[in-house]
Amino acid sequence: QVQLVESGGGSVRPGESLRLSCTASTRTFSSYVVGWFRQSLGKERILVASNGRSNYANYYSDSVKGRFTISRDKTRNTVYLQMNNLKPDDTAVYYCAGKSPGADDYNVWGQGIQVTVSS
């Protein structure tokens, strides 16, 4: 079973940047579709970015398009979410998730990490 560990969260001011990392416990993670989700207080968890098995198959939600970038380093079994020009509405718990080959939905989740954007 793949385990995912997120890091890089914290508190920043509007306009600043953060980079989240998600490191997997096994190299098989390189074959997974990977997504970053977030859940704000009182709201449903939503997908904000995903990276397919091909570099061109990236997805971004409208709310983060142009500000967030998802990337992966397969040599480090790590997926990143670079978040620029952060806004207070980006405040949430961010989750890294993976979808194994053949799976219908994301079936591996990290523990979540808090990102707070406040002046």
Image: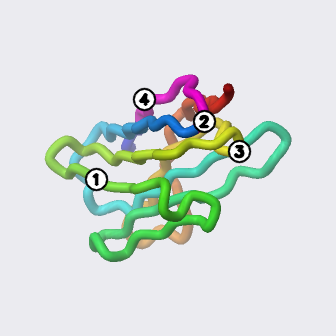
Q: Mark 1 belongs to which amino acid?
A: Arg
Disc 2 element: loop
| Position of residue 115 measured from the top left corner of the image (x, y, whole percent) | 59, 32
Number of numbered discs visible in the structure rendering: 4
Residue receiving disc 3: 89
From mark 2 to mark 4, how far is it between C-alphas? 17 Å
* Extent of the magenta region: 5-14
The image quarter containing residue 88 is top right
Q: Mark 3 belongs to which amino acid?
A: Asp
From mark 3 to mark 2, how far is it between C-alphas? 10 Å
Mark linked to residue 14: 2
From mark 1 to mark 3, how far is it between C-alphas? 25 Å
Q: Which mark is first along the chain, 2 or 3?
A: 2
The verdict on residue 8 being magenta is yes
10 vs 33, left or right, is right
| Position of residue 96 measured from the top left corner of the image (x, y, whole percent) | 49, 45
Between 78 and 29, the one nearer to me in the picture: 78
Badge 3: how crowded within 10 Å, few (<14), some, or many (20+)? few
From mark 3 to mark 4, how far is it between C-alphas? 18 Å
- In what quadrant of the picture does the C terminus appear? top right
